[in-house]
Amino acid sequence: MNLPLRLFLLFSVLGSSWASAAPAPKLGAADVPKPSPSKRHDAKVAAVKSGNYDLVLIGDSITHTMGELGGKYEPLKEVWKKHFAPRNAINLGFNGYRTEQILWNLQNGELDFVRSPKVALILIGTNNSDDRHFKTVHTAEEIFAGTKAIVDLVKERHPTTKILVLRIFPRGGDGEKGVSPPAFNSSKQCIETCRRAGELTKQLADGKQVFWLDVNQIFLRPDGTINSDLMWDLLHPSPAGAEAWAQAVAPTLATLMGDKPPAPERLVLWADQAPIGDGKFEVAQPVLTVYRPANANGAAAVICPGGGYGGLVTGAEGRGIARWLNTHGITGIVLEYRLPRGRQFVPLLDAQRAIRIVRSKAEAWGCDPKRIGIIGFSAGGHLASTAATHFDTGKAAAADPIERVSCRPDFAVLVYPVITMSEKGHGGSKRNLLGPSPSAESVALFSNEKQVTAQTSPTYLAHALDDRVVSADNSRMFHEALKAKKVATHYLELPSGNHGLNGYKGPMWDAWQSGSLKWLASLKLIPTQE
C-alpha cells in the first residue's frame, strides 16, 4: 500500500474516532430545544409575524402571569396596561416552561418579528431547578448554559435588539408561608441552585447589547426570607409585587429603549401670598422645578441647594442632582426657597409646602406618596434636616387641599450639612437664618440635633473630615441623635474633599452618590443598585 493511501486511511479512522468522541446533543438538556407545540405558541407566532413590537418579554409563568392569566392573576393585567402595553410590548411567557422549551419556541417562529424589537427582557430558569414538580432538574451551570443559548439566539436573529437578562427571582423555603394558595415551598437545593444560576447569568452582560439586572431585593425581608405580601405563593409576584417589579425594571428599560424624559416643569409654591410665620404674609413666588425621569421607579426627592441662606447654588447642588437622580429613575424636584433674611420660618415653610405639593401630585408624576424624600447640601442640608425634624401629618381643617397633606419626608439625604446653630455650626448660615441676635429658644429650635424624635425621617449623611467651612461634627451629632432614637441612619465620613467635595466631582463625590443609592435600596425606597 503506497504512503498517500496509508495516510488517507489513518486520518479517516482518526476523524471517525474524534467525531464519535464528541458528545451528541441530548434531549432534556437545558440548552437543547425541547419540542413544545401549543395553541398559545401558535397564537404568539401569528402575533409576532403580523405586528411591530418594541419590547418582548420572554420567560415562564412569572412572565405569563403579567397580564395574560385570569383568576387570582386578573389584577396583574392592570400592571401590564400601566407599564408594558404603552411600550408596545408582547408577552412570550409560558406557564411551567423551562429554558429548553423557551429555546424551541424561539427557534420555531417566536422570533420572526417583522422588525427587530428595541429590547428583549428575559427571565427564565426557575423551573429548571424545581425538584418537586419536575422529574429532571438542572445544575446552576446547566441553567446558565440554557439561558446563554436563549440570549445567543436572540443576538443572532436580532443583532440590534438590546437584551436585558433579569436575575432569577428568589423562592421561598419550607419554613415560610404564602398568603395565596397553593404555596410553592422549595427545597434548599432548589433555592441554592436558583441563587447560583442567577448569579452566573451576570456573565452574559457585555454592556453593549446584553445587560443584567438584579431586582430580587424587592421581594425579600431584611432577614432574607420572602415577603409574601409581594410574592404571595413564594414564587409568583402578587399584584403589589408585580407593580414593584415593573417599577424596578422601568429605569433600565427606559434607558435601553432610548426614552426621552419629559421637559422640566416649573410650579410656584404659593398661589397668592407666601406665609412668613406668625400669621403674616408677603408677595413672593418661590418655585419648584420638576425633573422627571424617562420612566420613574416611584421615588422622588425635593432638592435644597446650599448657599449659606444668602444665595442658592442651583447648578451643581440643584439641577445637576435632579439629572443624576433621573438616571436612577428618581424624580428630582429643585426647590428655589426664599432666603430668610432673619425670618427664621420662611425656608421651612417653603420646604414643607414643596413636600406637600409633590405628595399631592404623586400619581400624576408617577411617584409613590410613601417614597417622597428630601436632599440638602450645606445650608440646604440644614433646611432638609429641619424639614425632617419639624413636620406635621397634614392640617385637616385647612381650606387649601394641599395643606391637608403630610409634609414629613420619607427619607433625607444630607451632604456636608449645617445641622446646629451652636458654635459648631456655620456662622453665616446662622446669621442669615436667625438674625444678628437670636434668642436662645430660636437657637435651640433650629439646632436640629436637639429636635430628633423616633418619628424623624430616616437619614443618610456624608461629610469630609477636612471640611473647613462646615465642621463634620454637624453630621456626627445628627447621626448620633438619630441612633439614640433608633431611627434608620448611615453616616459616610469621607477622608477628604473639603466643602463641596472637590468641586462636585471625583471619588469623594461619587462615593456619597453610590452610597446613598445603596442605602435607599436597603430601605426598599428604590430598586436594588448594582
Image: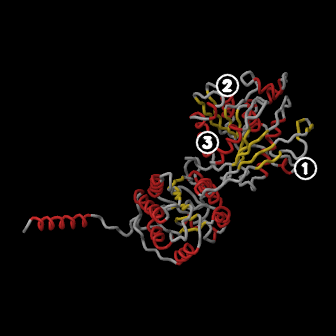
| Percent x, y of residue 513 | 61, 39
Residue at the spot of label 2: 471
Report which residue position mark 3 lands on.
519
Q: Is residue 381 visible?
A: yes
| Up/down of 36 relative to 231, above or below | below
Residue 515 or 269: which is nearer the viewer?
Answer: 269
Quadrant containing the N terminus is bottom left
The CA distance from mark 1 to mark 3 is 38 Å
Task: Say above or below: 271 vs 25.
Answer: above
Rounded to the nearest whole Å, what is the CA distance between mark 2 and mark 1? 43 Å
Query: Please, what is the three-letter code of the amino acid marked with disc 3?
Result: Trp
Residue 434 falls left or right of residue 115:
right
- Mark 2 → mark 3, Cα distance in angstroms: 23 Å
Disc 3 crowd, CA 10 A, few/some/many (<14, 14-19, 20+): many
- Residue farthest right in this picture: 280
Nearest to viewer (mark 2 / mark 3): 2
**Which residue appears at 17% of the width and 67% of the height?**
13
Foreground residue, 35 or 314?
Answer: 314
Where is residue 219? Give x, y as percent. Answer: 59, 54
Q: Residue 404 vs residue 450: left or right?
A: right
User: Which element type, helix, strand or loop, lies under badge 3?
Assistant: helix
Residue 341: quadrant of the picture: top right
Q: Amino acid at mark 1?
A: Ala
Q: Nearer the viewer, residue 486 or 388?
A: 388
Q: Earlier in the sequence, mark 2 or mark 3?
A: 2
Question: Given the image, on which type of amino acid does mark 2 rest?
Answer: Ser
Image quadrant assignment for residue 30: bottom left
Name the residue beneath numbered marker 1.
Answer: 399
